[in-house]
Amino acid sequence: MATNLIDSLNARHGLDGALSFHEKAPGIAVAHVRAGGAEAEISLYGAQLLSLKVGGAPDLLYLSSRSLFAPGKAIRGGVPVCWPWFGPRSDRPDLPVHGFVRTAQWDFESAQTLPEGMRISLATSSTPETKALWPHDFRLRLEITIGRRARLDLVMSNPGAEAYSATCAFHPYFRVGDVSGVSVLGMEGTVFADRLPGGGEATQGGAVRIDSLTDRLYACPGVKRILDPRLGREIVTAQEGFPSTVVWNPWEEKARAMPDMGEGEYRSMICVEPARVGGDACLLEPGQSLRLGFGFWSE
Ligand code: TA6
């Protein structure tokens, strides 16, 4: 990335001590935010929140030590934005898993200082290249609010002449001390689909625990509490407009087959993802917009 982009971002949007930009790797511009008692890093590539530290506590997010920071490759960790589809496309297996905006260069729109911290807005929109993958006009804005409580708002719009339908999710990698000791509360009694081969439907008994490869879609829109005794904290999540929640951990064997996941690091993460998939897809008529929200914090 030409340093003139970094220089331009710092000149136009830099705020001494609160907001600065640097190049994390060629083509990967990152905003460094200090606001509201928190410190965060946001990659403009993929509009991906990479890190969120509050006070002196460990990062709330996991970022793989082997993550690839290279245009065209997804960043392993933080909060990827999965849009305009979640997961693989069964009808088009040639298309990238989780859509194409997590590997797009987003534009930095604005930074707004707030009582609770700072709101960063990033945007991306359809191009001939995206329309070759997905034949619709679109505009996306991601508003990331940094403070003791983080919040992400995805605002999708349809500037085109035809309706479009999109599935989506935020795919947060929460950092934990040891996933085998973690309990996730808030999904008790809800139905889930086991997304592993041969998986069926079941009802969640007590807390969700992880002791093997786990990939489940819960019909559960409510608040979740990720209890982490090793780090002595609870990560609380809240979602608006996301009727489902995906819980994922690759566990040992699948993680070892992932070149961008550090050795043994599967034990340091759990994904609890607000999702809008299947029959809950977002249907936008021409001229319509839709805002979906996701918040998380540590208690
Ligand atoms: O959210 C769960 C999931 O869909 C899993 O099936 C697994 O594919 C995971 O996302 C990671 O996907 P990625 O494309 O980032 O490797």
Image (spheres, helix red, strand yellow):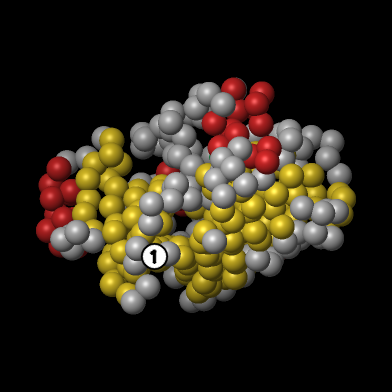
The x, y position of residue 11, in whole percent, is 12, 58
Mark 1: amino acid:
Gly
Q: Is residue 204 left or right of residue 48?
A: right
Q: Nearer the viewer, residue 5 or 286?
A: 5
Q: Nearer the viewer, residue 274 or 139?
A: 274
Q: Is residue 71 visible?
A: yes
Image quadrant where residue 280 sits = bottom right
Q: Where does the N terminus fall, quadrant-wise?
A: top left
Q: Where does the C terminus fall, quadrant-wise?
A: bottom right
Q: Mark 1 falls on what kind of element? A: loop
The x, y position of residue 14, in whole percent, is 18, 60
Q: Nearer the viewer, residue 117 or 104?
A: 117
Q: Is residue 130 visible?
A: no
The x, y position of residue 254, in whole percent, is 65, 27
Image quadrant where residue 264 sits = top right
The residue that appears at 56% across and 40% down in the rendered structure is 177
The residue that appears at 57% across and 73% down in the rendered structure is 285
The residue that appears at 29% across and 71% down in the rendered structure is 112
The residue that appears at 36% across and 59% down in the rendered structure is 38
- Tell me if residue 259 comes above or below residue 157 in the rendering: above
The x, y position of residue 195, in whole percent, is 75, 43
- Tell me if residue 139 comes above or below residue 207 in the rendering: below
Residue carrying label 1: 147
- Tell me if residue 158 comes above or below residue 105 in the rendering: below
Task: Establish whether ligand 1 lies closer than 8 Å to the Cβ of label 1.
Answer: no
Q: Nearer the viewer, residue 288 or 263?
A: 263
